[in-house]
Image: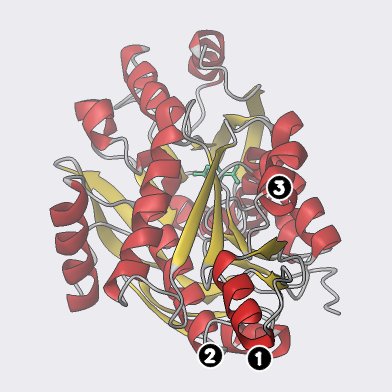
Amino acid sequence: MTTRRLVLTRSAAVVGAASTGLLLPQIVRAQSGKIRVGLMLPYTGTYAPLGVAIENGFRMAIDEKGGKLGGREIEWFKVDDESEPPKAVENANRLVQRDKVDVIMGTVHSGVQMGIQKVARESGVLSIIPNAGVHAATRALCAPNVFRTSFTNSQPTLALGKPMWDRGIKRAVWITHKYAAGDEAFEGFRDSFTKAGGTVVKELGLPFPQVEFQALLTEIASLKPDAVACFFAGGAAAKFIRDYAAAGLKGKIPLYGSGFLTEGVLDAAGPAAEGIITTLHYSDSLDTPRNKQFRLAYAKTFHLQPDVYAVQGYDAGQLLVIGAGAVKGDLGNKQVLYKAMESAAIDSPRGKWTMSKSHNPVQDMYLRVVEKGENKVIGIAAKALADSGAGCKMG
Ligand code: PHB
């Protein structure tokens, strides 16, 4: 709001001239009347489908409410962040400094999110995180202008250890892409699995976004654990599932994971995905009118099946609609805006959820199994699970 450019408008100059009788140009504030929304998401690379699903869901939530925010039209700005952390600050600054967006909605990759958080903290721009689970964003680096509609990286896996133990798994191997998302997912898994009684016999990893799994799968075969648990997402998840089966491990060593493993990839993974058990805050098969209506509308609009990323984008849209509505489109009215977003109860396809004090969803975690190409709910692994928000001091 404070950074609006000053422009000379022809109509203002004419009105001025008519009313004063003088032909003086007048400087007036541009009143485009539009809210400037910046999308910073991956549109290339292994996480590209996640970025697309998030944008689809986000636009759908806003369109369902008339396509405006607090009565104002929207001007869209987009950046492909490529899931490249070294480019993150520059990309976020393109939206904030050059395009002067009122809100930055992004992103998927935890490393890139850290760049967005730096820019959001420095500029004070409203930041809505529709996926990236990096702990710091709603822990030590939490801020009044930063809201997450997805999860923290350890949230899904905090619900995974106990169901594995209950299925007789005593020794497990962990495998992941080595960066914040995988490492923090491991924290949740290690804590819940060891607390239940289990032992993590080995932690394996490879750099993001590499997908050469062969040597690691050979190592798993020789370790002979009771099960494998993992964090992979997007294109890499589909390949990991297929390679796991091709290596002869499927049916011998059961595969578990945080539920991203089986989101948006079931067509690509094919029969290799059948039987994989995961925990996540969403499931295709949630048998609620809200989820069914959402899935139908999404499929009709985009000719795609929605996944957890679409839901998180949709909820980011719902949250922004609520916030902008409370301030009638004046996103500069920060106190009222933040209050409305903090106290929002989101009626999500995943089930209703609320914001924790540190601005992260308090939500149920579902236990799911892949059956006939679908993520089927087989139980609730954790009820109203909140992240600790450790180290978060607002203000
Ligand atoms: C992340 O980098 O935080 C991340 C990426 C993809 C997911 C989940 C988390 O599916």
Extreme-front residue of the structure: 21
Distance of mark 2 from mark 1, alpha carbons?
7 Å
Q: How many marks?
A: 3
Label 1 secondary element: helix
Residue under label 2: 326
Position of the C terminus, as image quadrant, is: bottom right
Which tag, 2 or 1, sits closer to the chain's start? 2
Instruction: State left or right for residue 298 relative to residue 208.
Output: left
Residue under label 3: 98
Q: Are marks 2 and 1 in contact (CB under 8 Å)?
A: yes
Colour approach in the figure: secondary structure
Q: Position of residue 338 (x, y in %)?
A: 66, 83
Q: Position of residue 83 (x, y in %)?
A: 60, 33
Q: Amino acid at mark 3?
A: Arg
Q: Position of residue 11 (x, y in %)?
A: 54, 71
Instruction: State left or right for residue 68 relative to residue 330.
Output: left
